[in-house]
Image: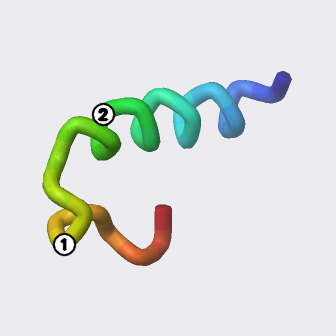
Amino acid sequence: MSRIDQVLDSARNRYRRLPADQVPEAL
């Protein structure tokens, strides 16, 4: 897994804890 993929994955894990309407479309 590339470093960029790791960063995106950790960001997705963080946003998963927010209500769906707060998740940025880009992720």
- Looking at the rendered structure, the secondary structure element under dot 2 is helix
Type of amino acid under label 2: Arg
Type of amino acid under label 1: Asp
**Residue under numbered circle 2:** 14
Q: Are marks 1 and 2 in contact (CB under 8 Å)?
A: no
Who is closer to the viewer here, 18 or 5?
A: 18
Q: In the figure, is residue 16 to the left or right of 5?
A: left
As drawn, 15 above or below 10: below
Q: Residue at x 18, y 72 (%)?
A: 21
Figure coloring: rainbow
Residue 27: x and y, percent?
A: 48, 61
Residue at far front of view: 20
Residue at far right of view: 1
Picture mark count: 2
As drawn, 23 above or below 15: below
Other-residue count near label 2 (Cα within 10 Å), few / some / many at <14 / 14–19 / ≥20: few
Q: Residue at x 47, y 72 (%)?
A: 26
Badge number at residue 12: none
**Residue under numbered circle 1:** 21
As drawn, 16 above or below 2: below
Other-residue count near label 1 (Cα within 10 Å), few / some / many at <14 / 14–19 / ≥20: few
Q: Residue at x 55, y 41 (%)?
A: 8
Q: CA distance from mark 1 to mark 2?
A: 14 Å
Quadrant in which the N terminus appears: top right
Q: Quadrant of residue 22?
A: bottom left
